Amino acid sequence: EDGALWGGRFAGGPSPELARLSKSTHFDWKLAHYDLAGSRAHARALNSAGYLTDAEYDGMVSALNELERRVTDGSFVAAEADEDVHSALERGLMELAGHELGGKLRAGRSRNDQIATFIRMYIRDTAKSLSAQIRALVDAIAGQAEQNFDVIMPGRTHLQHAQPVLLAHHLLAHAWPLVRDLDRIRDLLRRLDESPYGSGALAGSTLGLNATQVAEDLGFSASSPNSIDGTAARDLVAEYAYVLAQIAVDISRLSEEVIIWNTKEFDFVTLDDSYSTGSSIMPQKKNPDIPELARGKTGRLLGNLTGLLATFKALPLAYNRDLQEDKEPLFDSVEQLEVLLPAFTGMIVTMRFNGERMRELAPQGFSLATDIAEWLVKRHVPFRDAHEISGGCVKLAEQKGVDLDGLTDEDFAGVSLHLTPEVREVLTIDGSVATRDGRGGTAPNRVREQLAELRERLAAL
Ligand code: ARG
């Protein structure tokens, strides 16, 4: 018995070249426990339908449990001749249960419906553990927002000074996309909640097995309504790869800012020593490797997503062996985030913000010009004129080499008679921030409200 799952119509075993090409045990071993759970559920279905006596069923389950112990402690591993995890475990079962009993388990199932089910179970489990890690990151960002609540920074568009904002407001703008990612995962898990087990190779089986019972045993609330779709579809694999790539992109955008903030020129943040690296040649260096790795890995996750979509795009129904190529990119995206998230969260938690430096830069670059314009609008000056007038102030300040609050009362009056000395009320960053108090604005009361809303959303997810 060489363990291959076919043979009847073949003159001999596969060539060594084919065996090498075909082999997947070095990556699909990760699915061994799902395979064993599937086998137990399948054995129960065979028993309920009368294909295994109660005694045979008990014997099958003890053999599968023993096999699972051996897989767990590493005493059962893939052999050179095993093609994939499914064939390896069937070989193990035959060794433990004997040919007579072990040979009964494959009735009514195919590796096609097995693998389609196990990849979903893998997605379900890893999505749950990644969700917990993303929550921890959102908590870390929200914690920093709270601890640095009084810090005002230059808000930017086009990377140019635009308007002053609370640092907390800016940080929470990085938290919300991650909250949406958590929601995306939840949504994906709802769609994923259907087991293809029972689809067989593509057309179902003649044996009258209870696919719903198998689905429930494996933690799904239903079984696939279409056996062809059940075995051939991988859209959920692509969707998960997309959500993982989106998470990476969201982290990468924050990473880019941390890298910039950490430069001498910005000097907005200090990274903790334990979350920075040194240089092998330049003794003075302290580098932001975590956000750089995050940015770099994001490229890799985008590649995984693109590769998966390319693999799927022209596949005729139903199963094709191309589908074996779905696993490595997906596993890779999951594993990259699993190592990245704890390091990234640790960096955020221990990062120190230089609030003084941020406050100092916040009013620079005429970032209060919009405040002057809106102050005029409140005095019933049409916005088109207010914009002109405020622009005149900027021009004058630039000529004089001062910031907007460096203009004298006479300067203001010279630009427009609407500009009475009271305009100074809005020429402070605190005044500017405090008055942007519509829903979603950067006023401290609104940002407090936002922080509470974020935490509520998180708790409801
Ligand atoms: N190892 C295959 C995969 O990962 C599952 C086996 C299906 N193979 C087959 N020849 N029908 O997709």
Image: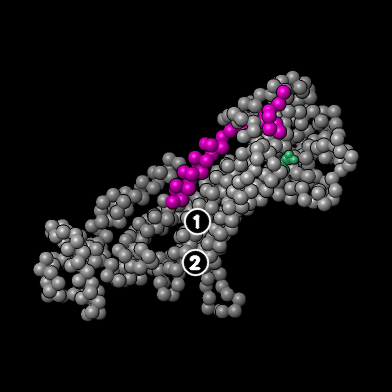
Quadrant of the frame with the C terminus: top left
- Dot 1 or dot 2: first in sequence order is 1
On the image, the x and y values in percent for residue 45 come to: 70, 25
**Residue most toward the left?**
417
Question: Viewer-proximal residue, 374 or 363?
Answer: 374
Q: Is residue 179 magenta?
A: yes
Residue hosting label 2: 272
Residue 446 in magenta stretch: no
The mark lying in front, picked from 1 and 2, is 1
Q: Which residues are magenta?
A: 177-206
The quadrant in which residue 95 appears is: top right
Image quadrant where residue 413 sits: bottom left
Give the percent coordinates (x, y) of residue 245: 54, 52
Q: Is residue 67 above or below residue 301?
A: above
| Mark 2 C-beta closer than 8 Å to ligand 1 | no
> What kind of residue is marked 1?
Val
Residue found at the far top of this picture: 50
| 402 lies left or right of 19 | left
- Name the residue type under label 2: Asp
Residue in the image at 59% along x and 56% along y: 303
Q: Which mark is residue 95?
A: none
Residue neighbourhood size for the residue with mark 2, other residues' Cα within 10 Å, grouped as few (<14), some (14–19), many (≥20): some
Q: Is residue 151 visible?
A: no
* Residue at point 77%, 23% (across, down): 52
Picture quadrant of ligand 1 = top right
Q: Determine which residue is flagged by label 1.
A: 249
Q: Secondary structure at mark 2?
A: loop
